[in-house]
Image (cartoon, coloured by chain):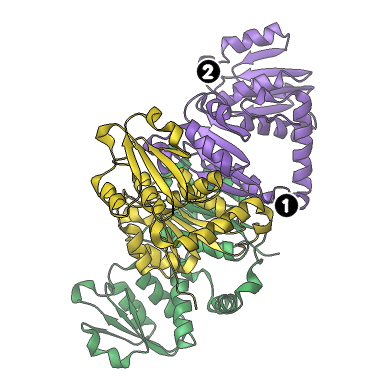
Chain colours: A purple, B yellow, C green
Amino acid sequence: MNEMRHLMTPMDFSVDELERLFDKAADIEAHLQDYAHACDGRILATCFYEPSTRTRLSFETAMIRLGGRVIGFADASSSSASKGESVADTIRVISCFADICAMRHPKEGAAMVAAARSTIPVINAGDGGHEHPTQTLTDLLTIRSLHGRLGDFTIGLCGDLKFGRTVHSLIHALVRYKGIRFKFISPPELKVPDYIIEMLKAENIPFEEVIRLDDCLPDLDLLYMT
Amino acid sequence: MNEMRHLMTPMDFSVDELERLFDKAADIEAHLQDYAHACDGRILATCFYEPSTRTRLSFETAMIRLGGRVIGFADASSSSASKGESVADTIRVISCFADICAMRHPKEGAAMVAAARSTIPVINAGDGGHEHPTQTLTDLLTIRSLHGRLGDFTIGLCGDLKFGRTVHSLIHALVRYKGIRFKFISPPELKVPDYIIEMLKAENIPFEEVIRLDDCLPDLDLLYMT
Amino acid sequence: MNEMRHLMTPMDFSVDELERLFDKAADIEAHLQDYAHACDGRILATCFYEPSTRTRLSFETAMIRLGGRVIGFADASSSSASKGESVADTIRVISCFADICAMRHPKEGAAMVAAARSTIPVINAGDGGHEHPTQTLTDLLTIRSLHGRLGDFTIGLCGDLKFGRTVHSLIHALVRYKGIRFKFISPPELKVPDYIIEMLKAENIPFEEVIRLDDCLPDLDLLYMT
């Protein structure tokens, strides 16, 4: 019997599991018609406690393209949250209606609360400034498509490296692969936080901090702009 | 020719009709796959003038699981009601789009107004403090599932018996069945309203009012907590 | 290869194209079952930056009745527009998800901006006081159904002829057909604007302005009330 799993952070999947997931994603992309009925009869609930049109519609489109159906709400004001219903109460009922739930919430940890009460898998579609795992998985998949594999490349990360949630998640996700070298390109006031620098040093992962993109462009295999 | 009917209050169906409805519900529950295309090509409109996530998604999930599709709106602010369009105008057009409509509205009687102008069946999914018939039908169906039949039992109703819309509707629905005995359990300030007590006396339906649940628990076949 | 086209104004289609479109519409209406799977696997995005229940649900119902699916949002507050995302950013991503987009926006020209950035056809479902082409096409189709053909009739336009967007669009659409005579019926303060009167004179299209409907009713083949 499979134990039910949730997707809360990009680290919830092992590198091996991600590899299989990305192989599946590549196969779906190449043979979309073969998957047109893969989710027939299944229902996705999109529970968005704050609007995020692109994220919500990406989940809904994916489910629809796989033959499934969608229920849900697009923001808290059009949900019972506006009259004080808790995330725990909502997810308990949603669990009876849907087969899987993608949840977006402005508060850190909300998806964890939902997962604890849910009887269906919950995907964290962003909980405040905390995590947005499918964004990170998409970044990894894009790198894999462009570079051919995850590993053995020099990647430049350019822009706001201090406050950007997605870039921090991406760094954490990438250090699990072999042969990654980082070039951090940012003005001094938007540098990568110290705790990430310490982590890279502790794990002997090569990195360099520069201010001007031109200073490292020739060294890069990939460039990620925040 | 069938005359079109609406569902405005739980009393709109006779006891015989409810029996057939509950038989059908039990059959759907037991053989969901057989009904996966029962509503192919049909459209449900959910017109929710106030948010009620669980109620709205219960209707939408039901329609989807039967093979149908859903259109609608989740709250007044995302509908043309926000620019003053009347319920009557909206339902007249919705009638051209959908095959059936579930309507939620904060004002008593709104569903009746809609039904009067509609050319498709309207289900009252809650009109203010007035009625919420599918809630009552669900309560009856749950009792039937637990007890095996509707009738010949002692039911305890416990909690706020004064202001609770659902418990009043349930009492009215239950008195139509034979051999029902009520135990009303509430603090004195939340007692069943006098008009209900008068009705029970007039119809010779046995009941007792107590303050502590322990005082009647051994007598109960079923316990309903508000 | 077909160049992609958008529908921004009722004049985007030639009279010949409209004739084929209306023939198709009449055929769909007469043989709805034959079209139940015409849009299988296709996705419509309804991007409504202001609520318009009837317009939005008309698009969604049409897509559903043709076998397609729908994603989207019903008002700006439940979309990422509420956090400052631009129409251009949104449509670029929507283009990846959907096959066609119907957009409603309170600002004139918004649909044009979207069309310029979109890689899928965009239908203008109303941009402020500017255009609402499918409304005009529906008016033309209704006239064609009632009169049998577009041309050779006297039409009365009655009501607010000064500020009504739809009536101005309809006049511009009708002058492309042969043998149309207009009777404008309105109080003096709500008369047809001068620029339309000048256009009719320049094109030698017969018209008359009257104040009382009774003054011209016997002359009319059709009467359009604003």
The amino acid beneath tag 2 is Leu
Q: Which residue is mark 2?
A: A190
* B154 in relation to A114, above or below: below
**Does C98 sit above or below residue A118?**
below
In the rendered image, residue B5, in percent from the top left (x then y), is placed at: 43, 68
Q: On the rendered image, what quadrant is the C terminus of chain A found in?
A: top right
Counting from the top left corner in percent of width and height, residue A175 is at 71, 18
Q: Pick the residue in front: A40 or C124.
A: A40
Left or right, A64 with respect to B78, comes to right
At label 2, counting other C-alpha atoms closer than 10 Å, the crowd grade (few under 14, some 14-19, many 20 or more) is: some
Kind of residue sitting beneath label 1: His
**Of the residues tagged 1 and 2, which is closer to the observer?**
1
- Residue at left 45%, top 40%? A75
Q: Residue at x 37, y 38 (%)?
A: A83
Q: Quadrant of the N terminus of chain A?
A: top right
- Give the SS element for disc 1: loop
Which of pointers 1 and 2 lies earlier in the amino acid sequence? 1
Name the spot of residue B25 as percent of width and height, x first: 57, 55
Q: Which residue is mark 1?
A: A37
Q: Residue A8: where, in percent of width, then height?
A: 61, 27
Evaluate whether residue B143 shows in this view. yes
Residue drawn 71% across and 64% down? C1
Q: Secondary structure at mark 2?
A: helix
Q: Is residue A76 above or below residue A129?
A: below
Residue C71 in sight in this render: no
Is residue B21 shown above or below A163? below
Question: Residues at marks 1 and 2, common chain?
Answer: yes
The chain ID associated with circle 1 is A
